[in-house]
């Protein structure tokens, strides 16, 4: 009767395997964190901040696409709402601390997220994508027309101000560590959400929505909540971005931006935590490198080609493909 | 001069006419999108680029070889349609059967490439294309002046729209198409070359977009980005009409053009956004669009 013993052995082996996986993941995260902490010593902090802002934007977007299976083609609207709100507040109310400006910007994007979700949630798949796209376009025209946005020129010279009233953010290094803290906060929040029972339901909805419905989950409520959270985080990314660059522009609201965040996420790997970060780093880097060289005018066609290639050849993205490779070759 | 609703009649009718013309373009473009989506379940984000290619090819053929408007009206859609079939054959076919979202992303990439490459070659300032001689002048009506070319655009756009609707909904070829995309295996069993049918359908949808591009060349500025913004409006039109509904696409296209025209008279700042607002209202009342079937 050694059958039950075998079972336990197998279970034990699986547990060990899981533990080893966890340890590997923790080690990787630790290495990345240390790299992020020392990075500004080697790389220009403003460039790093740009990457972090877009990475947060992509992480927020991926909460929706990667873990809930909803493709929003209107996420630029939230980025821009955070961006413009914070820009307006910090430019016009000098007594306001920076974090207050960012909090209100994030809140504004969250509210907009509720409105979008209530309209768009009634349809699925590409219908959902097109509705969010059209809603975002409505927001875009609002920003073009509204009296406070500076129209085509956008808002310039937004003061970075003081964090908590005493940390001078004009200092790039101080600013960098603030952005890093915000990014890590957002990243950990998404990690926490995805790993929670709530996140499990989201994944269930992504895999098979009718089944989730038949299990008794109020699917729409879950989707709305995920959408609002994603919108809020995207707004946070926009708010922080405005403080970093002291500028809010129509670029943030244009639907090209919604396309770009899709590319970042898809390229890095949808449905993985690290994927959007890798994707954002790659795209921001690529755009920067291209703009320096003779290929400066070819950014759009090259991004387009990467899009096509990713969709056709490696849909799991960089991180997804690496994960597959590791799983295949390291047991 | 007579006034209607506090606005001079000539202004009102002028904007109404412009609205109908824009609506004709919306109808043609959303028709092509509806054909491609309704039959192939491909969401063609490259549709705006195809419209733009139609106009660009028309201008370039005229500049390089002196090919006139009437020949271009047939030749340019044919050229662009073949190009579309190549895209279908080499790219879209590889993601057949995958989530529809991938077709959207793939064609978005294709659009970025086409637009970016042409922008680098020609710039965004626009090419000039002069109106064919025969269209100089117009009808003098009591309440307004109707240029010949605009009348022609409305006439021919409606003709193409009706012809397409008739072909797909009422003819044998149309029923093959609908069947072939519904149950490919069965149709294959009847000896019909379904992959070819799919290529042709995509090519046909693209041709309608390119045809709209040729019509646009004499009246709009021809440049590599002309398709990118109209595309988003057309997407909204398709959502309002009900995706996949061919009649819905045509009627909604014209209607939205008119609504946009009226908004330009009474509240011009709002005219570029009004269609998106209509979309929101329609979706709140009828989630599947005005002519869509409940999904």
Image: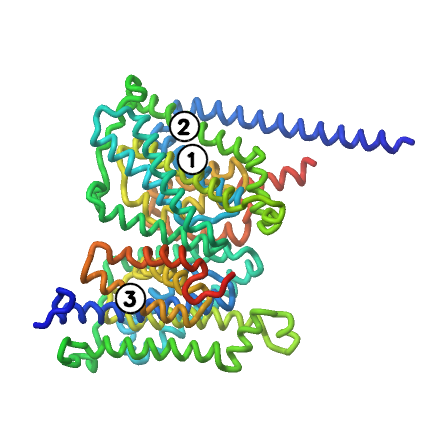
Report which residue position mark 2 lands on.
Answer: A182
Q: Residue furthest top?
A: A166
Tell me how far mark 2 sits from mark 1, CA to CA: 9 Å
Q: Position of residue B238 (x, y in %)?
A: 40, 63
Q: The disc numbered 1 marks a residue on which chain? A: A
Give the SS element for disc 2.
helix
Tell me how far mark 1 sits from mark 3, CA to CA: 39 Å
Q: Which residue lies furthest to the left in this view?
A: B1
Q: The disc numbered 2 marks a residue on which chain? A: A
Q: Do labels 2 and 1 share a chain?
A: yes
Classify the position of the N terminus of chain A by image quarter: top right
Quadrant in which residue A107 is drawn: top left
Q: Are marks 2 and 3 on the same chain?
A: no
Question: Which mark is drawn over residue A56?
Answer: 1
First of labels 2, 1 by sequence position: 1
Q: Where is residue A48 in the image (x, y as percent from the top left)?
A: 38, 31
Q: Residues within 10 Å of mark 1 (few under 14, many from 20)?
A: many
- Residue A139 higher or lower than B114, as above or below: above
Tell me how far mark 2 sits from mark 3, CA to CA: 45 Å
């Amino acid at each position: 009767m050694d059958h039950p013993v075998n079972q336990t052995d197998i279970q034990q082996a699986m547990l060990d395997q899981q533990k080893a996986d966890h340890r590997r993941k923790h080690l990787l995260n630790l290495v990345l964190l240390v790299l992020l902490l020392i990075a500004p010593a080697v790389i220009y902090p403003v460039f790093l901040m740009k990457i972090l802002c877009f990475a947060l934007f992509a992480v927020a977007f991926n909460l929706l696409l990667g873990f809930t299976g909803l493709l929003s083609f209107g996420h630029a609207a939230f980025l821009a709402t955070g961006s413009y709100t914070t820009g307006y507040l910090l430019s016009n109310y000098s007594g306001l601390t920076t974090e207050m400006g960012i909090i209100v910007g994030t809140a504004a994007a969250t509210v907009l997220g509720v409105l979008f979700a209530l309209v768009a949630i009634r349809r699925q798949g590409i219908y959902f994508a097109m509705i969010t796209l059209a809603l975002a376009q409505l927001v875009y025209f609002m920003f073009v027309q509204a009296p406070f946005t500076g129209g085509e020129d956008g808002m310039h010279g937004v003061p970075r101000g003081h964090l908590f009233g005493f940390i001078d953010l004009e200092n790039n290094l101080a600013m960098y560590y603030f952005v890093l803290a915000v990014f890590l906060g957002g990243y950990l929040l998404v990690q926490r959400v995805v790993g929670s029972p709530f996140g499990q339901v989201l994944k269930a909805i992504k895999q098979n929505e009718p089944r989730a419905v038949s299990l008794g989950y109020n699917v729409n409520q879950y989707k709305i909540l995920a959408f609002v959270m994603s919108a809020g985080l995207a707004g946070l990314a926009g708010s922080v971005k405005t403080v970093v660059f002291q500028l809010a522009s129509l670029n943030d609201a244009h639907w090209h931006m919604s396309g770009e965040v899709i590319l970042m996420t898809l390229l890095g790997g949808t449905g993985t935590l690290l994927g959007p970060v890798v994707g954002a780093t790659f795209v921001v880097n690529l755009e920067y490198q291209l703009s320096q060289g003779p290929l400066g005018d070819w950014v759009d066609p090259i991004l387009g080609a990467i899009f096509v290639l990713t969709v056709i050849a490696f849909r799991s993205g960089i991180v997804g493909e690496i994960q597959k490779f590791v799983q295949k070759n390291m047991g | 001069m007579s006034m209607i609703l506090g606005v001079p009649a000539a202004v009102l009718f002028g904007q109404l006419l412009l609205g109908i013309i824009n609506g004709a373009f919306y109808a043609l473009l959303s028709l092509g999108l509806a054909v491609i989506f309704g039959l192939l379940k491909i969401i063609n984000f490259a549709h705006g680029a195809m419209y733009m290619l139609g106009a660009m090819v028309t201008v370039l053929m005229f500049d390089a070889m002196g090919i006139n408007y009437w020949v271009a009206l047939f030749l340019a859609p044919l050229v662009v349609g073949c190009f579309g079939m190549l895209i279908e054959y080499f790219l879209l076919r590889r993601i057949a059967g995958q989530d529809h979202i991938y077709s959207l992303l793939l064609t978005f990439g294709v659009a970025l490439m086409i637009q970016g490459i042409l922008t680098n070659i020609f710039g965004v300032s626009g090419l000039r294309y002069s109106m064919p001689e025969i269209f100089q002048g117009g009808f003098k009506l009591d309440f307004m002046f109707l240029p010949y070319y605009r009348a022609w655009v409305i006439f021919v756009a409606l003709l193409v729209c009706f012809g397409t609707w008739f072909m797909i909904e009422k003819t044998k070829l149309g029923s093959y198409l609908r069947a072939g995309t519904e149950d490919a295996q069965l149709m294959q069993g009847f000896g019909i070359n379904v992959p070819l049918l799919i290529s042709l359908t995509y090519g046909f949808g693209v041709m309608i977009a390119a045809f709209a591009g040729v019509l646009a060349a004499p009246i709009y500025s021809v440049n590599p980005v002309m398709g990118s913004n109209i595309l988003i409006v057309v997407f909204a039109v398709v959502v309002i009409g009900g995706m996949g509904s061919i009649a819905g696409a045509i009627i909604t296209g014209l209607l939205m053009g008119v609504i946009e025209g009226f908004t330009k008279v009474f509240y011009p700042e709002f005219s570029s956004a009004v269609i998106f607002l209509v979309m929101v209202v329609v979706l709140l009342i009828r989630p599947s669009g005005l002519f869509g079937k409940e999904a």
